[in-house]
Amino acid sequence: MARRRRKEEGSRQRRVSRGGRAAAAAAQLRSPRVSLPRAQVGRSASAARMRPPACWWLLAPPALLALLTCSLAFGLASEDTKKEVKQSQDLEKSGISRKNDIDLKGIVFVIQSQSNSFHAKRAEQLKKSILKQAADLTQELPSVLLLHQLAKQEGAWTILPLLPHFSVTYSRNSSWIFFCEEETRIQIPKLLETLRRYDPSKEWFLGKALHDEEATIIHHYAFSENPTVFKYPDFAAGWALSIPLVNKLTKRLKSESLKSDFTIDLKHEIALYIWDKGGGPPLTPVPEFCTDDVDFYCATTFHSFLPLCRKPVKKKDIFVAVKTCKKFHGDRIPIVKQTWESQASLIEYYSDYTENSIPTVDLGIPNTDRGHCGKTFAILERFLNRSQDKTAWLVIVDDDTLIRMVFSREAVRRLLASKCRCYSNDAPDDMVLGMCFSGLGIPVTHSPLFHQARPVDYPKDYLSHQVPISFHKHWNIDPVKVYFTWLAPSDEDKARQETQKSFREEL
């Protein structure tokens, strides 16, 4: 019931964000970047751009592994959205859009896919849908690219390193690069109508606009005086770059290398790079780029569900290791026990101090204030060497995370056999593990349902089309309330388990 009330509230509050122009955004100076307690990728820029964001090793309680029904009744579009759509229709009636007439051959579709077999198959299905719609329109087939197949280009998943390739390959005969996720659903005729409103000879950055309600650590507290002024795209709805903008960004990339050595929130960081402190275009909100399938005018919608291609993993096949230390035994561990501990069949607490009342296991690794690489690798060694226990999956969690990290036994075996280790006990474990697995050729599968911050750190409209699996940090929130609002199993999950059968057939 809590999740249903949250969904209904979200639907009432959902609005398509309006975009600000560069003058408004330029008035805000970016706050200096701060050092984060954990980063998502490797220490070097090249290594960082080779891996997906760091909400890597996360797993929901088995009861949460159920299908998200996206057919909930949502509220009507806001008056602002209706006005914007009417203005668009008036433009079309006036004939202005005919000046920008394009066909499908002028659009390059880029599906932000992953190499994991499940995700690759979903992306292939979307590609077939795009090509079939094109054939039904008796138009020449467009180019449809799968991002994971471009992975030889270093950092392909971060998009920006691919722009020079797009510029060289497609700038002569194309007008738009349209990006979407593997679960984005596209109505090709409506997409064509939408893009015809925008002059392709100009620089355009189009998308469904998101904005921060308050300054957040995952965006380095950017625009702290007024976070709502800066808009960035919801990738789930699709987003587009005009070829002139792609060419401009390519020239910039050739003249100056990317400065950031890690990526935390790709959609926000791409928008920042394109905006270029007012030197480039801000995001133009497009009302037809949608995530909710409730309005007739939507060119895109988002098909969101938990990716179950087989039966859910059984609790007895998951071993949960909680990282903690003596100073947090009294405040953080009780929250774990109040919330998700009961969902774990096999669980141990690893600390720098033995306390039988919890109980904790002292790994012999002193607590560190920064990274916890030494403790993490000690947990990996213990998991692999437990001869009496051949549990298939290891979940490593922080004591202030409402569910966090996941390894298969085979991945742990290959990692430890490689001799790749921490350079110090306080090295950032996520970064070291990312570099180790990258070197071993073991791909990291990313899901946006895993969150490295609190619910308040994400736009409501972004969370509205998700069933979140995890959140991180207890700062200035009630973590028990967060768990039971967003993550706790409910009666609705049982109903979703029935619905997911149809999607298994589709797969």
Image (spheres, rainbow, N blue to C red):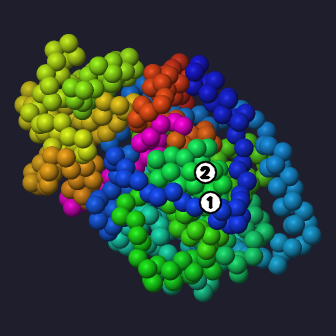
Name the residue: 62% across, 70% down. 278
Could you tell me the amino acid type at mark 2?
Answer: Glu
Of the image marks 2 and 1, the number of the one nearer the N terminus: 1
In front of the other: 480 or 285 = 480
Viewer can see residue 380: no
Magenta-drawn stretch, dominant element (helix, strand or loop): loop
Residue lying at 57% horizontally and 77% vertically, measured from the top left:
246
Label 1 sits on a secondary structure element that is loop
Q: Where the N terminus falls, by quadrant?
A: top right
Q: In x, y percent, where is residue 468?
A: 49, 36
Instruction: Classify residue 332 by image quadrant.
Output: top left
Instruction: Quote the CA–CA distance across marks 2 and 1.
Output: 7 Å
Marks 2 and 1: CB-CB under 8 Å?
Answer: yes
Q: Which mark is residue 225?
A: 2
Where residue 119 appears, as percent x and y from the top left, is: 43, 52
Query: What SS does tag 2 mark?
Result: loop
Q: Residue at x 51, y 83 (%)?
A: 251
Which mark, residue 28?
1
Looking at this view, name the residue that lies furthest to the bottom.
Answer: 172
Identify the magenta region.
Answer: 439-456
Q: Is residue 1 above or below residue 200?
A: above
